Amino acid sequence: MDELLEPVGLGALESALYVRLLAAPRSSADDLAVATGLPAAELTGALTRLTEHALITRLAGTPARYVPAPPDLAIDALALRRQEALERLRARARDLTRGMAAIPRGNATDLIELIEGDQAVLHQLARIQLAAEREVTIIDCPPYLMGQPIANDEQTQAMNRGIRYRAIYHAPLLAEPTKLQNVLQCMALGEDARALPDIHLKMIIVDQRVAVIPLSFGGAETKVRILIHQSPLLSVLVMLFDLLWDKATPVGARPAPDGPSPRDRELLMMLAAGMKDRAMARALGVTERTVTRRITLLMEGLGAATRFQAALQAAHRGWL
């Protein structure tokens, strides 16, 4: 059977009857019984539900005949009512969550929870972000749960609702083209992004009421996280983030007066993206020898022994 109306709370039978009436308006229950192969008596409840949802109208006369409402109008109206109901449900859930947060937590097990396993961790990270009301703060560094950074779809949804995101990144990450592109996309949505040259701390704090940190900050990924509720420990994490935020350099900040020229800044961006000399020369319209010479001068000015260090120093100074 057709499942057209299942997203708005109606079943496959209602969907099949509605689609049939679109093809054959003014059908009676007997006509529909023949079309579906079901007894007319079994269709009564489904026809009543379709009528109550304003998807069909029963015409006067005997036998009763039905005409469908135009799908674009009727289904749009149903979807809107469904969305409004879901928003009321979410608002109620937030009220209940605030009520829970106001209850004193006396035991350590009430303040801290262990989350184990990839899917359990991802579920909790999604849940707390979707429940955010004001601000989400993040410190991002490797190692990563899935081996590499993954798209944070919940961040996009939250920011579309007006939630503020502030993120501090491990600066060497910005030398990786894929990660840099992801950060720039988040910034385009409104994220405030900063970087620190050597930070090996990872955490996310939502509305200063709940935080998630790894079980360990060193070594390999443990696939275990600690969920921390409102407590002195959470307050310390909030203060730690604020201290690091003040020290961090804005990603993409305008260069200082003694910073690189626009052409050198463009070269540094290409260098951070991992482009080869030939590709950079082609993009800049110069020779490879010119690119090599300019990179050498930039490395000397930045006090960098390698190109990677040059990109790192440039990111730390806000030149990228």
Image: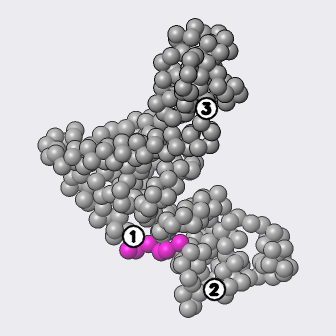
Q: Is residue 282 left or right of residue 164?
A: right
* Three-letter amino acid code of the residue under disc 3: Pro
Dot 2 corresponds to which residue? 260
Q: Which mark identifies residue 245?
A: 1
Dot 3 corresponds to which residue? 68
Can you say which quadrant of the picture contains the N terminus?
A: top right
Can you say which quadrant of the picture contains the C terminus?
A: bottom right
How far apart in space, not on screen, are marks 1 and 3 (Cα)? 59 Å
Mark 1, other Cα within 10 Å: few <14 / some 14–19 / many ≥20: many
Residue 297 percent coordinates (x, y): 69, 84
Secondary structure of residue under mark 2: loop
How far apart in space, not on screen, are marks 2 and 3 (Cα)? 68 Å
Inspect this view and state whether residue 209 appears: yes
**C-beta proximity under 8 Å, tags 1 and 3:** no
The part of the chain drawn in magenta is: 246-251
* Three-letter amino acid code of the residue under disc 2: Pro
* Closer-to-camera residue (269/48): 48
Q: Residue at x 57, y 66 (%)?
A: 188
Secondary structure of residue under mark 3: strand
**First of labels 2, 3 by sequence position:** 3
